[in-house]
Amino acid sequence: MIIAAMTIKLHVPWVHSLKEKRTEVKSLLTRVRSQFNVSAAEVGDQDIHQIITIGIAAIAANNAQADSILDSVLQFVEA
């Protein structure tokens, strides 16, 4: 069993308040969790309204599967 984790940092220049940021983060985390069955949470930069830092964790049977899951999540977030 492999535990895979990564941190993703995003710059969101269209967000102008912490309230807007909360909305964006909640939406992103919900979509990532439901699409990929991973654990996801905001893990940093919570007081900076134009930076989103999220952590992703997943459990896989082997290294190839773990890499595939994290690559898929990263491509989804970047799109």
Image: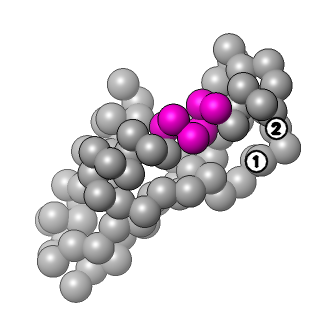
The residue at 24%/55% (across/down) is 69
Instruction: State which region is magenta.
Output: 23-28
Side of 29 where 52 appears, left or right: right
Extreme bottom residue here?
1
Residue that badge 2 annotates: 48
For badge 2, the amino acid type reads Ile
Q: Which mark is residue 76?
A: none
The residue at 76%/47% (across/down) is 45
Rendering quarter of residue 62: bottom left
Reply yes or no: does residue 25 show up in magenta.
yes
Disc 2 to disc 1: CB gap under 8 Å: yes
Callout 1: SS: loop
Side of 25 where 56 appears, left or right: left
Q: Position of residue 77 (x, y in %)?
A: 41, 35
Q: Quadrant of the N terminus?
A: bottom left
Indicate whether 47 appears above or below 49: below
Q: Quadrant of the C terminus?
A: top left
The residue at 22%/73% (across/down) is 60
Can residue 11 be seen from the camera position used here? no
Distance of label 2 from label 1 (alpha carbons): 5 Å
Residue that badge 1 annotates: 45
Side of 69 where 22 appears, left or right: right
Rendering quarter of residue 15: top right
